[in-house]
Amino acid sequence: MKTKKLNSWLETIAPEYPLMIAGPCSAETETQVMETAKGLIDKRVQVFRAGVWKPRTRPGNFEGHGEKALPWLQKVKNETGLKIAIEIANAQHAELALKYDIDVLWIGARTSVNPFAVQEIADAIRGSGKIILIKNPVNPDLSLWIGAVERFHQVGMSDIGVIHRGFSSFRPGAYRNEPNWQIALDFKNRFPNIPMILDPSHICGRRDCIYDTAQTGLDLQYQGFMIETHIRPDEAWSDAKQQVTPKRLLEIIDKLCLRKKQFADPELLDKLSFYRQQINRLDDELIELLSERMKVAEKIGHIKKQKSVAVLQTDRWKEILQKAIEKGKNSGLSEKFINRLFKAIHQESIDKQERILKKN
Ligand code: PEP
Ligand code: MN
């Protein structure tokens, strides 16, 4: 996928600040939509979002007003000057979005998992010149995300962006949707010309971690945000816990620290290059150490083979992990990090030993 000019739309709508797409999870009533939008008239907010078709996990919840809500959004555009954005999940939604001249269309996380739905939407908006934003699929699958983007690129859409909204996880954690930053960063590295927008609302699932997550996004050079905003968040018909008032959103924007992309000061550059060299050297040492550790694991593999012992020795593994966690704690390394690191190391040792045991 050649992505040279896919970001020019961003410079047009948000030339000075990060792109800010704000507005309620769902368009509930004309009054709620208008009151929220009026609170968002600010030069740092460019696009008003509202869901009119809501993909709900369980039936019986509010599923959006559909077409009836689209004139409310047109009114927002006419009265506030904000651009308007909605989620579309099938060809019929796409046609209605075009009929009501919605400016920005986004593909939800439950739709980007489905190549049939994505293709159907791509065919329906082909040639429309609209801005299309593709949320990451609910499951942590980089190729599926890239595939969805490719389907829009293939039909000639040229104003494309992606939204990182986190990934479903089986284990309950601090986030509603695990950020798995690495997946989004891998996307960014592969397609640096496609703007990456962060949706801290759906990552956090609660309003108190939105600022912090948004700051991480800026530190990682994301180019914009989608943040759910409601005039009375506690009364919201969907996603009440994660929405903030327009006033709070503007406070969050005030607090966010925009970091410079590059260091201009030569003295700082020198210091930075000194530390970067140190990092490079330490990384080399880490790799050498890991390789040495794997060679020892292979020796153990040969002994296990001779004696027909199983590769996985649960008690020994528990002991290794426990020790590492303790040591890590004393050295300022979090348990979560040690867990992840040692699981990866252990997996590589198991793979190596398995290969030895299976070799004739
Ligand atoms: C939304 O933006 O309201 C929404 C449904 O998001 P997601 O597709 O990320 O779940
Ligand atoms: Mn929502």
Image (cartoon, rainbow, N blue to C red):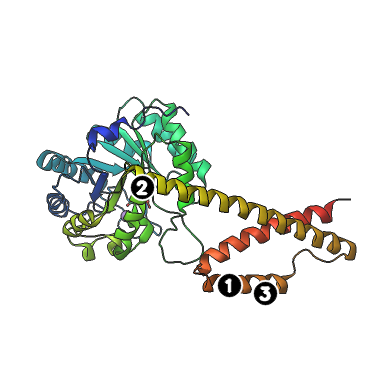
Quadrant of residue 99 within the rendered picture: top left
| Amino acid on which the number 3 mark rests in the picture | Glu
Splitting the image into 4 quarters, where does residue 294 fall? bottom right
Q: Nearest the camera: 252 or 338?
A: 338
Q: Are marks 1 and 2 in contact (CB under 8 Å)?
A: no
Residue 327 is marked as 1
State the SS at label 3: helix
Q: What whole-number distance in Å separates the C-alpha atoms at marks 2 and 3? A: 44 Å
Q: Residue furthest left?
A: 79
Residue receiving disc 2: 268
Of 86 and 359, the residue lying toward us: 359
- The residue that appears at 34% across and 33% down in the rendered structure is 7
Q: Is residue 306 left or right of residue 8?
A: right
Tell me residue 288's x, y (percent): 66, 52
Image coordinates of residue 252 in percent, x first then y, are 23, 57
Q: Nearer the viewer, mark 1 or mark 2?
A: 2
SS assignment at label 2: helix
Q: Which residue is mark 3?
A: 319
The residue type indicated by label 1 comes to Lys
Could you tell me which residue is drawn at 38 percent across and 44 percent down? 269
Where is 42 relative to 330, above or below? above
Q: Earlier in the sequence, mark 3 or mark 1?
A: 3
Residue 116 appears in view: no
Q: Position of residue 111 (x, y in %)?
A: 42, 45
Q: Is residue 208 above or below residue 18?
A: below
Towards the viewer: 210 or 297: 297
Element at badge 1?
A: helix
Residue drawn at point x = 45 percent, y = 52 percent? 181
